[in-house]
Structure formats: C-alpha cells, structure tokens
Amino acid sequence: MMNDFPPIEELLPHRGTMLLLDRVVDFSGDSLAAEYTPQARAWYADDTGSMPGWVGIELMAQAIAAHVALNKRQAGLPPKMGALLGTRSYTMSSPASFPAGQCLRVHVQESFRDESGLAAYDCRIDGNDQALASATLKVYEPDDFGAFMQEGTQ
C-alpha cells in the first residue's frame, strides 16, 4: 500500500480544465481512491453551478487511468495510452448532479484484466460518506494505441 503519491499531473495526460481529479488518496495493486471538488464556474457547470451527473463517468475513467499509471510506475514501466470502451449501467442516487464545493471520492477496483489489455473496473463516487454514483467501466490498453485508433478510421 502506497501512502505518498505523486501529483495527479504526473499520472494523467489531461491538462487544464480537462483534468478532473485533484489527488490520489489511496492505492493498492488492484484499487485506487482519488478526490475531486467540482467548481461552480467550470466548463461542465449547469445553471445551478453543479457538475452534471454524466461527468461522473469521466471522473471514474480518470481514476482508472491513475490506477494503471501507479501500477506501471511501481513496475518501472512507462505509462501507455488507453481507451474507455463504455459501461452497461451508470447509476446515480438522487439528485442527478454533484454540488460545487462538495469533495467527491472516486473509488475504482479492478475486477478483470486479461493479457490483451482489456479490463473492467467496479467504480463508485462518494460524497459526504454516501454513495452517489456507481458503474462498471470497461477499458482497453492496446500495445500500440496509434494503430488501435487507426483501425477505427479505416
């Protein structure tokens, strides 16, 4: 279990307003917890200043990317690009948004990974010690990300 984590910018390629995690707060080989506090004036803010619930999928995806990056770092390997394939079900408790200023904790737990780079993660977003959203996300980390992306355009 690691307790001293690098800045989130060292783990994720996202920058500026697209970086939606503030920090990693817990990590083990198969799980990670990160935090994010929605901002009332951010690009995603609705007319009440809240973060719409659908942005939660991106919070989960970035937490998965941070988990993979920390595992690669521990193994002495460079990070690789990956892709979010999707989810069959994304469930939110009421209300359907995350209030600005409320610290969110994003939990991801790897439940499946095969040798091809395909993986599944059970994900949850908590706020004020309550589960606010959950999903199982499917992700893929191909050996050659550029070739993988080209396949989709041909």
Image: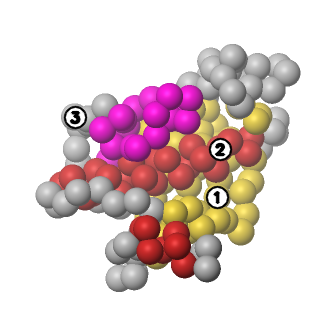
Give the label, 3 or 2, closer to the camera: 2
Residue 137, horizontal then vertical, whole percent = 58, 63
Find the residue positioned furthest to the right.
47
Of residues 113 and 20, the one nearer the viewer is 20
Residue that numbered label 3 is attached to: 4
Q: Work out whether 96 lies above or below 66.
A: above
Q: Earlier in the sequence, mark 3 or mark 2?
A: 3
Q: How is the image coloured?
A: secondary structure
The three-letter amino acid code for the residue at tag 3 is: Asp
The three-letter amino acid code for the residue at tag 2 is: Gly
Give the label, 1 or 2, closer to the camera: 2
Q: Which numbered marker is on residue 135?
A: 1
Q: Answer yes or no: is residue 125 visible.
A: yes
Q: Is residue 112 magenta?
A: no
Residue 19, horizontal then vertical, whole percent = 50, 35
Residue that numbered label 2 is attached to: 56
Q: Which residue lies at the image location 32% right of the left edge and 47% below the top edge?
A: 27
Q: Work out whether 144 lies above or below 21.
A: below
Categorize mark 3 by other alpha carbons within 10 Å: few (<14), some (14-19), many (20+). few
Q: Which residue lies at the image location 26% right of the left edge and 36% below the top edge?
A: 5
Q: CA distance from mark 1 to mark 2?
A: 10 Å
- Residues at marks 1 and 2 touching, judged by CB atoms closer than 8 Å: yes
Residue 33, horizontal then vertical, whole percent = 43, 43
Find the residue positioned furthest to the left.
76
* Helix, strand or loop at mark 1: strand
Find the residue positioned furthest to the bottom.
115
> The magenta stretch spans which residues?
8-27
